[in-house]
Amino acid sequence: MSESAKTDPSIWDVVIVGAGVVGAAIARRLSRLDLNFAVVEKHWDVGEGASCRNSGVLHSGIYYAPNSLRSKLCMAGRELFEDWCHELGVPVRTPGKLVVAQDPRELPKLDVLERQGEANGVSGLRRLSGSEIEDLQPGIKAVAALHVPSAGIVTPYAATIAFAEDAAIHGVRFFLGRELQWATVEHGIFRLGTSQGEMRSRWLINAAGVHSDAVARNLDPDVPTVYPCRGEYLVLDKTAGERLKMLVYPVPPTREGGLGIHVSPTVEGNVLAGPSAEYGFEAEDHACTEFVGERLIREARAYWPGIVQEQVIGAYAGVRAKLSPPEVGGARDFHIRESKRARGLVNLIGLESPALTAAPAIAELVVDEMIGARERLEPKEEGVLPSYRWPPRFDDLPEDEKRRRVEQTADHGEIVCRCEGVTRYEVLRALKNPLGVKTLAGLKYRTRLTMGRCGGSYCLPRIVSILQEECGWNPEQFVLKDAQSPLFAGWVKG
Amino acid sequence: MGEGLIMSEHPKDVVVIGGGPAGLAAAAGAQEEGARVLLIERNEELGGILNQCIHDGFGLYSFGEALTGPEFAARYIERVCTGNAEIMLNTLVTSLNEKLEMVYSRRGERRFVRGRSVVLAMGCRERTRGMIRIPGDRGAGVYTAGTAQYLINEANIMVGRNVVILGSGDVGLIMARRLTWEGANVIAVLEKLPYHCGLTRNVKQCLEDYSIPLYLSHTVSRIHGRGRVEAVTVTRVDRDGRSIPGAEFSLECDTLLCSVGLIPENELSRKAGVVLDARTGGAVVGADLMTEIPGLFSCGNVLHIHDVADLAAIEGEQAGRNAARYAAGGNARIPSEEMALVKAGRGVRYVMPQRAPIRGEGLRCLFRVSEPGADRSITVLAGKEKILEKGGRKVHPAEMIHVDIPRYRIADGESLEVRVE
Amino acid sequence: MSRITTDTCILCPNGCELEIHWVKGETGVRVMEVIGHRCPRGVEYGTEEVVAPKRTVTTTLRVIGGIRPLVSVRTASPIPKKKIADCLAELRQTTVQAPVCRGDKILENTARSGVAVVATRSVACRSEVRCNR
């Protein structure tokens, strides 16, 4: 779960606040350098904010004004993200995207996207007609489409966890379950008051996502305001995923502030429909609503008539850290700047889409250019380099390889999650993760347990028995995410 | 099937997938017909769902006794174990194809096996909160009723202390009493239809005996509690299930149990190419319970959701015997020209079997009505001719009804139809 | 004074709607007539429901040293409804040692009802635990 409550007395070179995908990417980049640094994260695992609540799309750069920070970092990130994932073993796919116009009046917007994409250097853009769309992706209703072959997908929580666990293996200290409560600066050193004692550091990287403006205001009143903007999603069964091979987006609505309700296949074979965009909710209000749920199906059905209510197996929501207020809508550029008031404070504010794609490029910007401008960045002398791989899923292996592994390791023969094919071996391995996370959500994101169509009916009893056998747990020790989410209420019979 | 696969010995006569009531009875029946049977069960003991159904009421049809689930299972387990059926426990069948080849997985072993005939008896799973899209937060404390039943009755784990139950099906009603008996406070049972879905006797024994309120035409419109459930918003709904505005109230609780329907677990069947009936969720079968794939039979909850385990077992035994005969070379497929459709007519939600021979004697049809009613007439038509009529019946969607058609004959292109008016 | 109670018989899935006509006299409740049953057991049930209602109690007991933590049990026959709470309280305090066999009598007489409590399932010993039987 979290580190011990003891306060580290020395001064950290760098403290990162927030272990979302951006914080984790920065940690990964830093972890190869000879510096002393830590990540502080208030949740009991990484990536619990927007990082695990998005569509996992790797954008190619058609949506952003050329020469904006977003567009530059997205373009650089698109390639770098794949490199990082390749090094770590996190699967990335490139199914491509169709941005569809359902009405001839939308064609000028397709033109704009095409031109913007070309200006940003996106390759392979093509305009398609009705029959050409049908050849690429059957079942779509559209008058024309823009084909973006380089659009990719990744499992966002896998990438976030992999970046963080890789950083942890390479010596980054992750203080999970530790909340930053106040911060001051004295003689150029930051004093950080956390829920588990004080820390001091020379650099403070504020990657606190939807709370980044509040964190920054401890030290600098001149930071932009974050307007939380919630987006809901529906998760569709893998049978829907069998029929959707590409990302399909509508032409983006002008004012709304999102890219429109799209349908995207996931790496595991499900389909996501969403996200919506609603202002006015609290930063961590991840509730889903009836109204938006209906709307998601309705709008997706407009261009993908094959979508069926019975295929919905779940819903979730994420909250974007938007810099543009509700009356303006749209999206502003990333705010990634060193504070003028507090030297050494780097604020990353307003990192909504495409921050996932851009994360590795953001990490290089913050570390190599910003920190690197004033620090000597020496590679760490690591001796024998520890290696980290995001393990390939047993269920994805070919049948003969499965058989071989089962014969070698009996625990691979015991299938704990029937919907996702997760084996006992995988569960035990996930329990030994480098971050020490022992929550059900932590196990879920590392293995896919409970994420299948049966919602955990098959696997929950098995996980309970495994954790009792392997860790001697009592019912009270099973939590979904943290102490506020206990799963059970004790034994039935003492 | 994939390279490098090792076949586990010579093909069996009959492979039964699932060791619950239907599968046990199928294995017993097949074995008694002289077949070599392999019974594959994913849990560590036989009995399936019966093991967690510690309440009584099983066996009334078959044995004239009110047995608990485990006692009922024991009757069939004994029958199976007196023969030489091979039983594999802790073993999951991961795939099946139209050649009746299966891959199974267990500790240390992943092999394939083939049967001359196969009986699908995998049972069902529960509809989840995610599938019915109950809005609100996604904190801990939302469980399906069956999962809660397992945790309480087998794992000795209490799911919560202040419970609201959504759905008045039998599982939900039984759990209301079970939780009360284990010291929990069951606040209410909510049912979105204007009538209860479980057996009337369960409403009495499980709710009325304990003064647990049953709110008909009500549902949960929102769950509150980001960490753990704290409350649910309850709304009144109209006939179409739509919330009536202004008719909301809140119930504080720490647990929501969803008992909102069972879904036949046909993932294996689907991958094998079995034709499924959207109305039952199970395979399309003939009177012999064989699916459209030769030698592949289906029975129990995976075929259609039963309310009485006795009938699931009886169906399982029938499937097992037919599977044994098929494996022995008899009971050949009836060509499709000689099969007619069995239709669900007015007032009927679904009929089993979906296909029957055009000429037959002693066909039993099982069906469910769409709406409850008193004093209804059940009619069976062969083509346009009424061949059976029974009046004055009280009917309810929660109770499966059977009619036995003594002798019939259908002309070319016509079908059998069951109506309730 | 004559009273009528309507009730649903719980003895089999037919769930016959009964009308039980009864009077309360000096010696207690006396049933005059039962209407609506489809079999003679319904008359018995209707009468009993008004005079002295009974229920079968099914629950679990803690097992020590078994392959599973609980064994399911039942009262061998229905006990008076008003004794259910006492029966459950008694069983909550009861543990059994593995192995348990289906049909084993756990308690001779629960809550002074004269009815025994029996195991409805078998629970074998955990292999590392030595069994006494």
Image: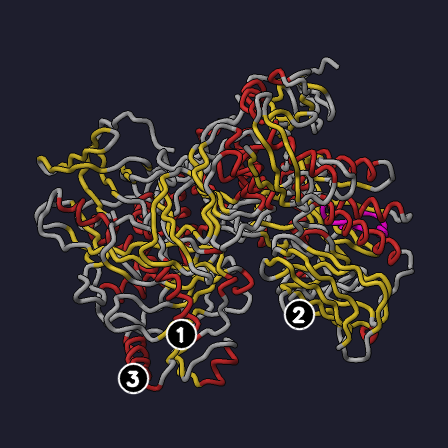
Between A209 and A11, the residue placed more toward the observer is: A209
Horizontal side, residue B379 vs residue B199: left or right: right
Residue range in magenta is B6-18
Give the residue at mark 1: A148
**Where is residue B27 drawn, in percent x and y?**
81, 46
> CA gap, disc 1 to disc 3?
17 Å
Q: Nearer the viewer, mark 2 or mark 3?
A: 2
Disc nearer the start of the sequence (1/3): 3
Q: Residue at x 78, y 61 (%)?
A: B290
- Identify which amino acid the numbered label 1 is placed on: Val
**Where is residue B218 drawn, in percent x and y?**
43, 52
Q: Which mark is residue B345?
A: 2
Q: Which mark is residue A108?
A: 3
- Chain letter of mark 2 equals B
- Identify which amino acid the numbered label 2 is placed on: Gly
Tell me, yes or no, whether dots 2 and 3 are on the same chain: no
Please check the rendered image and state whether residue A272 is part of the magenta-colored stretch, yes or no.
no
Task: State the SS at label 2.
Answer: loop
> CA gap, disc 2 to disc 1?
50 Å
